[in-house]
Image (cartoon, rainbow, N blue to C red):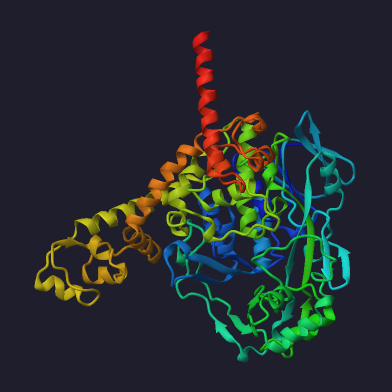
Amino acid sequence: MEYDLIVVGAGHAGCEAAIAAANMGINTLIITMNLDGIAALSCNPNIGGTGKGHLVREIDALGGYMGLNIDKSFIQSRMLNTSKGPAVHSLRVQADKIKYHEYMKQKLENTKNLRLRQMEAIDIIIENNCVKGIVVRDGRKIYSKAVILATGTYLKGKVYIGQNIFESGPDGRFPSNILSDNLKKHGIVLRRLKTGTPARVDKKSLNIELMEVQEGDKTITPFSFLNDEEDIKREQLNCYLTHTTKKMHDYIRANMDKSALYSGAIEGTGPRYCPSIEDKVKRFPDRDDHQVFLEPESESTDEFYVQGVSTSMPEEVQEEMYKMITGLEDVKIMRPGYAIEYDAIFATDLKSTLESKTVKNLFFAGQINGSSGYEEAAAQGIIAGINAANNILGKDSFTIKRDEGYIGVLIDDLVTKISYEPYRMMTARAEYRLTLRQDNADLRLTKKGYDIGLATKDRLERMTHRRELLEEAIKELENYKLNPNEETNAKIKSISTPIKTGSNLKELLKRPEVRLNELIKIFPINTKLNPELMLLIETEVKYEGYIAKNESRINKMHKLEDRPLPDDIDYSNIKGLKIEAIDKLNRIRPETISQASRISGVSPSDINVLMIYLELERRKHERGEDDK
């Protein structure tokens, strides 16, 4: 058997990688150890959230599938942070985890140029520092021009439930134990990371009358730019908010030695921003309660996810401590919580295309790169899939810069910063977040997706039409002149203070208290705008000055971003660099001056030394050409 591309793993990274490459015309094979684990929502039954929702919309804007899939399979939708600025608005939805898996499996089965197989990869074939395929469990060799490893948490997966420790992948599936050892033989450095999940409980055993009902939004915002609200609107399921108790915290403290996390059994580092309940009790001793959200896993099951109470306690301890949560006094656990430890690489060994720096055409995507979360995995998957396809097709590599998308921030952070814990995307990580909003992801990225052959013509036309509506609306606001007469000010008084000089609707909309939906009721303009487009227009107008400052900063940054660093530099030979900078630069091998500036331990003075070095090298090169 021979393919252009082999994708190992059919989690969120593998699915996006395979679909992207196949849609770009690449003959692709995607393999997984269990077809029932395709796009499994093993950790939590939701997609999106702060920062993560931005990633999903960017994946969709490029032509990926996660947004379309969750729009078909969500059971509750909520826009987070609406009381704050638009830069941090983030869409988060509850997924029907069964339907999400089924729809993604159907997509893989029905995508042209894509073959789906249940099999286990145990080795990769490398010749002359170039990947040539994989070896599967029965010893057969499957050849390809490129390979993407998207193994999730399966590499030497080990589950911890108190002192009950056993080899396993997530959700009780088989782990991948042989591939890790063979990757090490090829010189690929691995490390241990950890994540975890709470118990699943029976809805019928919950006292929901003691909890606060969490309803979905009345107005539903789709994840995919190909959908409108009417395309996906449906009856939503409720979630419920409750709290842990002091009694529960005291019980956990009394049994802390039984936690796998604190007994010393777990070697790997877990995600700082998704702590277990043991972590919370230990780190916040003065807190008597923590929020707990009860979330449905599917319309076809009574299993509820207990968000906020991840644990690696023994099952008998879990049985008791969950009953100490308000509303869970009679709870029946269906699946216990657990911690899972697994092998991952250091993503600093990768280029910004997610290709290995040492093995040509070998790509890595998802949790194997040290990230956490479905959305981070899918974002890496689509970039790895695009670049594997481009390598095969002989085209230029494709990257997204930090000022172009959260995907760019995610990958740049992974490949430049050595992190010893699973990386989680947050809006605070993006220095240009005012221009990288979720509402303008299509305006930023769809043309790029179209140019590489991934986004469809229909998607491009929708984006173009949306941009035209935005520009026309802003122009109309500018052209709608306001005179400071009695009639005009009588209208304005209902939403703001009167004007004293001539103005226009755009200037009036810049006032913090003025909303576009209220403004157009008083001064009718284009009323064919949907709520999301109205918010986009309002944001562009209100933050016009800040956005302009952002653009200025971005232009300055590009001067550094566009200055490449040669692959063969020995930084030890550059006089003036500090010892720590030499060590980090030789280890990480940054691709540009800008990337070098973001490496921990590389100071502004080190960057100045590098820029002087590059300039001297440029002049030497020019003199050499002149001599000839």
Judge whether residue 19 can be spotted in this image: no
Query: What residue is at 66 percent from the left and 90 percent from the top?
Result: 207
What is the x, y in percent for residue 46? 62, 68
Extreme-top residue of the structure:
628
Image quarter where the N terminus lies is top right
In this rendered view, identify the residue nearer to me: 316 or 124: 316
Is residue 541 or residue 519 the one in the foreground?
541
Q: Position of residue 201 (x, y in %)?
A: 73, 80
Quarter occupied by residue 40: bottom right
- Which x, y percent locates residue 498? 17, 72
Tell me if residue 577 comes above or below residue 334 in the rendering: above
**Percent x, y of residue 295:** 64, 76
* Viewer-proximal residue among 191 and 486: 191
As drawn, the residue found furthest toward the left would be 485
- Camera sees residue 578: yes
- The residue located at (74%, 67%) in the rendering is 196
Task: Identify which residue is drawn at 49% across, 54% down.
Answer: 431
